[in-house]
Image (cartoon, rainbow, N blue to C red):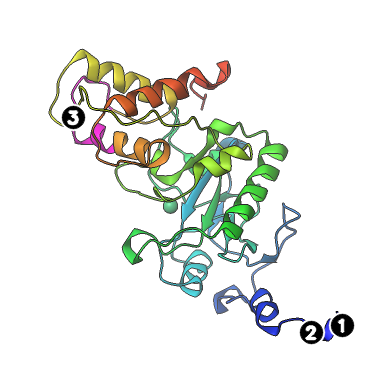
Amino acid sequence: MPSGSSTPGSDSKRHRVLPVPKTVAGLRTFEPDSSIVSDIIPSPNYGERNKGRQPDMILLHYTGMPDVEGALARLCTAGTEVSAHYVVLEDGRIVQCVPEAKRAWHAGASSWAGEDDINSCSIGIEIINRGHDWGYPEFPLRQIAAVIALCRGIMLRRKVPAHRVLGHSDVAPARKKDPGEKFPWHSLANSGVGHWVTPAPIVRGETLMLGTISDAVLSMQQALARYGYGVPLNGKYDAATMEVVTAFQRHFRPARLDGVADHSTLSTLQALLASLPAEGTTVATK
Ligand SMILES: [Zn+2]
């Protein structure tokens, strides 16, 4: 077919101009760390990694804002005190805002595997999605494919183990829901990104829930902590424990998010622990 017959509609969508915030004018640009970055929009919001900590975690977020323009403006404007290394658009384009060597500001108060300066140990990826407050649409496959490709490159270059590709809700269960239960962690795992086991089926039976005080609750808290979650170790199924169980379900057993530790939740947790690499169970040193 002659080249003149191409469809202008799909072409113009692919080459849609990025909404670059006016505030980035004058900021120094930089070389992208990943060869699949399509645009650099520099953010002034970053610092140095604490004590030269090298990143060995990838933290995934959704932007949770109604549009791309607003999300990019927030991440790239001085004074908002938020940023991320990368932003992945719905059409799969990847924007880099902060060099990987620097400490971007995406995690906030959070903890994982005994470490609480998550910004210093991680690379933050913001995925454009309106989030729970704005209808929470599905993630387009094209966008997920881009997230996978980006993560695979970072994992290879930075030696990030699969079980340290996490969601914001995993490291801040009391405050955050992103990237949320619609995020296709199983698809990522099929491509070697993230740690995953098929969730155990939901069946009737004994459960642990809010208010329970028992050795079984303590065992569950210890298992969650061994996996990395910041959870009380007091044998009480308190509100904080329920939030961690909900975060675990959001990531690893998304079919039911009720914060109740049923057989399926506990079995899935045990299967994840059993399939961690041996060194994965050690608490990271500060
Ligand atoms: Zn987030």
Q: Amino acid at mark 3?
A: Met
Q: Is residue 179 above or below residue 266?
A: below
Q: Earlier in the sequence, mark 3 or mark 2?
A: 2
The disc placed on residue 209 is 3
Label 1: state its secondary structure: loop
Residue 204 on the magenta segment: no
CB of mark 3 near ligand 1 (< 8 Å): no
In screen coordinates, is 253 left or right of 45?
A: left
Q: Residue furthest left?
A: 211
Label 3: state its secondary structure: loop
Front-lying residue, 82 or 155: 155
Q: Residue furthest front?
A: 1
Q: Is residue 18 above or below residue 158?
A: below
Residue 241 on the magenta segment: yes
Q: Amino acid at mark 2?
A: Ser
Q: Are there few (<14), some (14-19), or many (20+) residues within 10 Å of tag 1?
A: few
Q: Kindly identify the residue that appears in the image at 57 percent across and 43 percent down.
A: 188
The disc placed on residue 278 is none
The disc placed on residue 2 is 1
Residue 116 position within the rendered picture, expressed as x and y whole percent measured from the top left: 43, 35
Residue 185 position within the rendered picture, expressed as x and y whole percent measured from the top left: 50, 42
* Residue 164 sits in quarter: top right
* Quarter of the picture holding the N terminus: bottom right
Q: Amino acid at mark 1?
A: Pro
Residue 40 position within the rendered picture, expressed as x and y whole percent measured from the top left: 67, 65
The disc placed on residue 5 is 2
Q: What span is in magenta?
A: 232-243
Front-lying residue, 22 or 208: 208
